[in-house]
Amino acid sequence: MTKTINGIQVPQRADFVGSFLRPADLSDSNRDEYVAQLVEKQKKLGYTLITDGEFNRTYWHLDFFWGFGGVTHEAGGDIPFNGETARLDKVYLTGRLTAQPHPFIETYKRLKKHEDDKHIAKLTIPAPAQLFQQLNLPQNFLGTKTIYPDTTELIHDIAAVYQDFIRQFHAAGGRYLQLDDCTWGAIVGTAGAQRYERLGSDLDEVKELLLTVNNLALEGRPDDLVVATHICRGNYHSTWFNSGAYDSVADWAFARENVDVLYLEYDDERSGGFEPLAKVSDGKHVVLGLITTKRPELEDEDKVIARIHEATKYIPLERLSLSPQCGFASCAIGNKLTTEQQWEKLRLVKRISERVWG
C-alpha cells in the first residue's frame, strides 16, 4: 500500500534502490556539483524519490556505523564474495555505543535542498541488524563480547542510537528512510548460516535477534515517517555474497518487520520464487527488484511484465512497484556497466512501469 508525503505518492510504480556509479574524479571539492547533476538526471527520467547516489560515502554501510560513538575503523576488513574479494574496512567497537550528532544528517540536508513539490529526498542507511551482524563477525565477536557480555544490552544500545538518528533525521525534514539489510540475505544460504553456526548460534534464534533489533530501533518513530527496507544478498563489483530464496526468513522479515515498504531482490535464479510473498503482512508495499544492476544487458520487457503478473498471485498489483534489484555501486567500486548503461536500466524500469500501471 502506497503512502503520501506532502501529497506525493511513495513509492512510485517505478523506483530505484539508491546508489549510482561514482564519477572517476569525485572529490570533496566537486561532490555537491556532481550530486546536483545526478539529482537532475533522476528528475528528468521521471523519478519521484531522489538520492545523492551515496556519493558522500565510501561504503554503503560502514561509513554510517562509524558515525556513532564507540565505533572505529581501519583497513583490512575484506570479505570474500563470489569470485572476488570485497575490499572493506574493519569496523569494531572501542566502547559502548553512544548517540551523537551524525554526519549523515548534514549530508541529507544538502540533498533535501533539491526537493520540490514533485520530489522527495530519500536517505539510505544500513539496517540496525546490519550493525548487529557487523559486531558479531568472527573477527569482532570476542571484542564485542568483552564490551557487551549480554546480547540483550547490545541490541538495546544499537536500537537506542538508531532511535536517536531517526529523531535527528526527522528534525532535519526527512520523511522517507530506507534501511538496507543484507542480514536476511546472508542467512538464506550456506555462507551466512555457517558463520553463525561457528559462533554456536541457532539460526531461528538469530532471526529473532535480527527482527528484534530492527523493530526496537523503529519504536516511537514519527507517524509521518515512511520506512522502507531493502533486502538483498550482497552486491560488490557485479558479484554477490550469497544465494537462496526468501522462504526461510519470510516469517520474520516479511510478516513481522515493522516497515512500510519492502525492496526485494528478484533479478535471477539465486533469488528463488515469489511464493514467500504470501507471508508479507497486510499494508506493506513490495518493490520487485526484477532488473539487474550487475549486467549491462537490458531485460526483455514482456518477460519482466509476465513476472510482475506472476507475483500478483501473492500480492495485489496495486501493492507492487518495479525497480532494479540493488544499487549500481555499493561502494566506491561500482558494478561492471557504464554510466549510460545505468541510465538505460532506469529508462527500462520506467517503460515497463508505464505499460503495467499506466
Image (cartoon, rainbow, N blue to C red):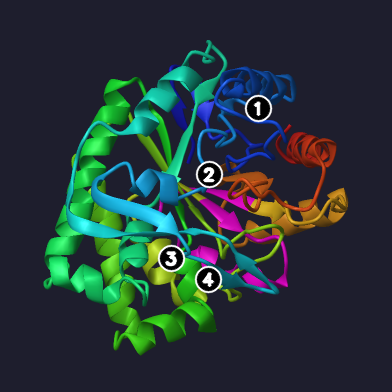
Q: Mark 4 points at which residue?
A: 246
Q: Mark 2 points at which residue?
A: 58
Q: Tell me if residue 192 comes above or below residue 5 in the rendering.
A: below
The disc labelled 4 sits on which kind of residue?
A: Tyr
Residue type pointed to by label 3: Thr
Please tell me which residue is depicted at 45% across the width and 26% down the height of the picture. Answer: 4
Image quadrant containing the C terminus: top right
User: Quick one: 357 or 206, which is closer to the camera?
Assistant: 206
Choose the circle earlier in sequence order: 2 or 1. 1
Residue 344: image quadrant is top right
Precedes in sequence: disc 2 or disc 4: 2
Q: Position of residue 180 (x, y in %)?
A: 47, 51
The kind of residue tagged 1 is Tyr
Secondary structure of the residue carrying tag 4 is helix
The magenta region covers 263-288
Q: Is 54 a magenta residue?
A: no
In the figure, is residue 14 to the left or right of 260? Answer: right
Q: What residue type is labelled 2?
A: Thr
Residue at 24% across, 76% down: 142
CA gap, disc 2 to disc 4?
A: 29 Å
User: Depth-wise, is mark 2 or mark 1 nearer the camera?
Assistant: 2
